[in-house]
Amino acid sequence: MKKKQNVLRRGGALAAALVLWAGLCGSAGSLRAAAEPSSEVTEVSGESSAPSETKKETPAKDSAAKDFEYYLENKQVVITKYNGSDTEITIPATIEGCPVTVIGYNTFSIRSSITSVQIPSTVTMIQPNAFYYCKGITSIKLPEGLVDIGNHAFEKCYALTNITIPDTVTYVGEHAFEDCKSLSSVTLPDSLPLIGEGAFKNCSSLSGVALPSALLEIGKETFSGCGELQEVTVEKNVSEIKAGAFSGCRKLKKVTILPGTLTIGEEAFADCTALSSVSIPATVGSIGAGAFRDCPNLSEAALPDGLKSIQPSTFSGCSALLLAAIPEGVTEIGEHAFSGCGGLSELTLPDSLTAVGNDAFSRCTALRIVHLPPNVRTIGAYAFAGCANLTAVTLPEGTEEIGDEAFARCALQTVSYPGSEQQFDAIRMNSDSKALLQPLIFGESEPFPLLPVIIGASAAAAAALLLLIVFLLRKKRSA
């Protein structure tokens, strides 16, 4: 009997230790799932004891946590899965006495029945895909204290109408709100430094957004396809507007880029069909290929002095663009850079220019006169092809190559070349291209004394004036 009592005492001590351990917040990394208290009976020395003496006293779980799977890490709760069927979810602030700080990967993903979520102030991180494709969510309030919104966290939440990012957030992940097609209002904290690529891509109802003053860059395709967005101001701390950042924003009318931005990426504003004006500061030293491609209402774009080249297709299809003043320092104009700019009537090229790319000014039907500066060495194929009203061209003496059909389908009446006929014959070009450059005037570099009059004249009057100039120059040479 004494031996049995000793065994019971040892069993009671063990049970008491278990109760004490279970009442504490779990150890790092221990996997838990919410459950009801156990009714298990402990066997002592092969005999069954009364439940009141031998029952494990597992701590009672929070009733709100019964539908969640989770684990404990450094005495903090990471929720990993929701198993319930509620449409309105309230995430508990604590489980087992420990704060819920992380909503884990895919916790609520592809749960179309959920309409709203309440997130407690204890949560600091929403991990990737946490609410991915919850297409029924109409509202969600993010708590102050939240720091990180993971990649794809709310992607394809089609019914979500507005979101306010708290001041404590330092990063909005890649594609975090992509395809939230009903999202019409986004409030970003002024202190937010980073927005990942595609974060608000294809938010087709988003009509306005104030970019934070602390923002360091605008990621690739961040606002691409935001079809209702109408006006954007890029703040001074943004060093780079990355590729496609605002592409396809078809109602975007005005873009203001404050001094500080260094780079505008490829197709950053491509296919912004309503864009009529853009302010590019002097700090910008690089504009990527196709940056303003197919912006048919863009009538003016003052280029900064720091540019070294005009990349391919930069302004291709900007049919309303009237003036192109290429700044000194630019050495190359890329292929298709201004192709299809049907309204372009004034073109100023810098002395630093050495190369004009293929199709660079093709189909610029309003161009009448082109004076290529003295350092140009190569003129690409079809460079001015289809410039139906181009009547006069000055070629530089140092020209080395003229590409195939560079001046095809133009209305040339005067081609001036300051060098000799022998020098002209040394220029690399095929016979068809050479035949297009007629009539030729040799030894003249300034054949257009009436240039201002010609630019302002009608096509017929311009042609008559040019013929008069040709006659006078030939007479001068024969004298």
Image (cartoon, rainbow, N blue to C red):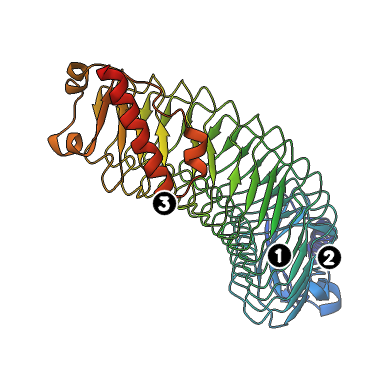
- Mark 2 or mark 3, which is nearer the start of the sequence? 2
Q: Is residue 313 above or below residue 434?
A: below
Q: CA distance from mark 3 to mark 2?
A: 99 Å
Amino acid type, residue under disc 2 in the picture: Gln
Q: Residue at coordinates 64% horizontally, 71% vertically from top-left? A: 157
Picture quarter with the N terminus: bottom right
Secondary structure category for the residue under label 2: helix
Nearer the N terminus, badge 2 or badge 1?
A: 2
Label ID, residue 207: 1
> Horizontal placement of 401 versus 472: left or right?
left
Distance of label 3 from label 1 (alpha carbons):
30 Å
In terms of depth relative to the viewer, which is nearer, 68 or 359? 359
| Residue drawn at 40 percent across, 47 percent down | 339
Q: Residues within 10 Å of mark 2 (few under 14, many from 20)?
A: few
Q: Residue at x 72, y 82 (%)?
A: 87
From the top left corner, tell me how far across and down residue 225 is, in percent. Answer: 57, 62
Q: Secondary structure under badge 3?
A: loop
Q: Are marks 3 and 2 in contact (CB under 8 Å)?
A: no
Q: Which residue is mark 2?
A: 5
Q: Which residue is mark 3?
A: 340
What mark, if any, has residue 66 been given in the picture?
none
Residue 450 versus residue 198 in the image, above or below: above
Picture coordinates of residue 387, whole percent (x, y): 36, 47
**Amino acid residing under circle 3:** Gly
Q: Earlier in the sequence, mark 3 or mark 1?
A: 1
Query: In the image, what residue occupies the spot 65% across and 57% down?
Result: 253
Tag 1: amino acid: Ser
Q: Quadrant of the C terminus?
A: top left
